[in-house]
Amino acid sequence: MTKENTFLEDIDLGLSSEKKFISSHFFYDKIGDELFQKIMELPEYYLTNCELEIFRDQSESIISSFDIIKDQEFELIELGAGDGKKTQYLLDNLLKNGYNFKYIPVDISQNSLDVISDRLVNLFPYLTLEAKQGEYFTVLDELFSSEKPKVILFIGSNLGNLNDEVAHDFLNKLATHLKPNEKLLLGLDLIKSREIVLPAYNDAQGVTREFNMNLLKRINEDLGANFILENFKHQPEYTEEGFAKSYLVSKIKQEVYVKDLDKTFEFDENEKIHTEISRKYNDEILNDLLKNSSLEISDKFLDSKNYFADYILTKK
Ligand code: AVJ
């Protein structure tokens, strides 16, 4: 199936559903990638700076927690590599301390991989880098075909886009690939007050709004729809159990025609389209996700505000 077909079918499914939704997966076209880069630089989007601080100040301890022997070659696999600015600290430290490893960034976007590869190879001439393009759910089998010991990085609270059931299945699947004592470094945003979380998804400059609206723009451009963007508003919500959710809300009763489906969708006034979940965590929630998974928490690194955690999970 082509990517376009998946997009078409998923949009059909999501907009036909009783509770309308569009998968957050579709945020990341070229414009979406750029908008997310901008989000990471927003003062309200604390996640990036918190995790950057952890990597900047605690790389040495993080590396010790990997429990690897210096001379033994290993593979450092990063799922959803992004721009590599956080990982950079880790790579720098590993190289300076003479570790023998290959860095394998995995990303769905070849464009992102090219950018990160160029940047890191320039920065670290002695880094062995082998980028892998693909959706990390589907490339896992290929990644684990080599016998080399592995450390997996899954940072940025990217897990938070999955609902708990899918997250549990994903961690389980990852765990089955790891050998005893191998590590997964999992970066998660922690549960905290709405006064801090909500602005991160509702910034004053309106970049997050644009990021969400870009979904409708994409449907217009790629699938020939006639969404009138002004007739929708961006609405983030946060529940104290740790669910940040984003919605696009129809300001009026209206109809939208999608040419490639030859279908009209009706929207009531105030009807919502769910676009994203950004789950926040604590130890208890993570332990629930790890139930029956053969992974256990072996270390935890926090930023100075205790907003964000990088967990080290060890395969039992
Ligand atoms: C990349 C999934 C971690 O949910 O915080 C940022 C994406 N969405 N602002 C998040 C996002 C809106 C981000 N993750």
Image (cartoon, rainbow, N blue to C red):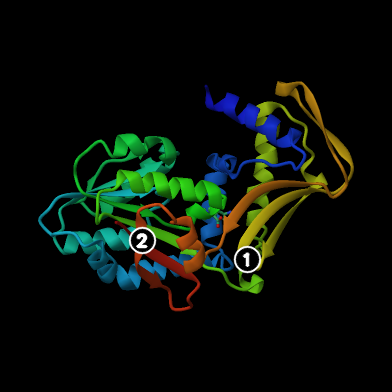
Q: Is residue 132 above or below residue 93?
A: above
Asked whether 292 or 198 is in front, the reply is 292
Asked whether 266 or 203 is in front, the reply is 266
Q: Determine the secondary structure under disc 1.
A: loop
Q: Earlier in the sequence, mark 2 or mark 1?
A: 1
Residue type at mark 2 is Glu
Residue type at mark 1 is Glu
Q: Position of residue 39 (x, y in %)?
A: 56, 57
Q: CA distance from mark 2 to mark 1?
A: 22 Å
Disc ID at residue 145: none
Q: Is residue 187 above or below residue 145?
A: below
> Ligand 1, what quadrant?
bottom right
Q: Determine the secondary structure under disc 2.
A: strand
Tag 1 residue: 241
Q: Residue at x 71, y 33 (%)?
A: 220
**Residue 225 horizontal side relative to residue 114, left or right:** right
Q: Position of residue 286 (x, y in %)?
A: 47, 61
Q: Residue at x 47, y 68 (%)?
A: 283
In this view of the protein, can residue 80 be seen by the observer?
no
